[in-house]
Amino acid sequence: MAIEFTKENFDSEVSHGLCLIDFWAEWCGPCKMIAPTIDELAKEYTGKVKVGKVNVDNEMELAERFGVMSIPTIVIMKDGQEVKRFVGVQPKAVLVSMLDSLL
């Protein structure tokens, strides 16, 4: 299951290793479409990639910090630095390919 990132735990959670962060909202249709993919990635990459979600309605500060203008936005970070960003629903294969290339 994906971790719920908040401003309280975000920096400590993403500071080391590979992380996939899904910026989403409850009311967002495309976010609901990609949610099962995010959960699958969380299971498949357990111990290799930290997969988490940021609810932009609850964590506006994080959304602003990352300049998230559209959701879903998926940010991939390595050791606390953003390395890739996807906006909109992405096929699972695209995300898997990106994660695998960074591992």
Image (spheres, rainbow, N blue to C red):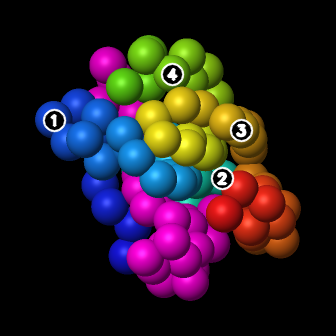
Given the image, on which type of amino acid does mark 1 rest?
A: Glu
Give the position of the N terminus as an image quadrant.
bottom left
Q: Earlier in the sequence, mark 1 or mark 3?
A: 1
Q: From mark 1 to mark 4, how far is it between C-alphas? A: 16 Å
Residue 3 picture quarter: bottom left
Q: Earlier in the sequence, mark 2 or mark 3?
A: 2
Counting from the top left corner in percent of width and height, residue 97 is at 82, 65
The stretch in magenta equals 33-61
- Residue denoted by label 4: 66
Judging from the image, what secondary structure is the residue with disc 3 in?
strand
- Residue denoted by label 1: 8
Q: From mark 1 to mark 3, how far is it between C-alphas? A: 23 Å
The label shown at residue 84 is 3
Residue 42 magenta-drawn?
Answer: yes
Q: Earlier in the sequence, mark 1 or mark 4?
A: 1
Q: Residue furthest left?
A: 8
Q: Earlier in the sequence, mark 3 or mark 4?
A: 4
Q: Nearer the viewer, mark 3 or mark 4?
A: 3
Viewed as shown, does residue 92 lie left or right of 80? right
Judging from the image, what secondary structure is the residue with disc 1 in?
loop
Disc 3 residue crowd, few under 14, some 14–19, many 20+, Cα 10 Å: few
Q: From mark 1 to mark 2, how far is it between C-alphas? A: 27 Å
Residue 60 picture quarter: top left
Given the image, on which type of amino acid does mark 3 rest?
A: Lys
Count of marks overlaid on the render? 4
Nearer-the-camera pick, 46 or 31? 46
The label shown at residue 30 is 2
Q: From mark 3 to mark 4, how far is it between C-alphas? A: 12 Å
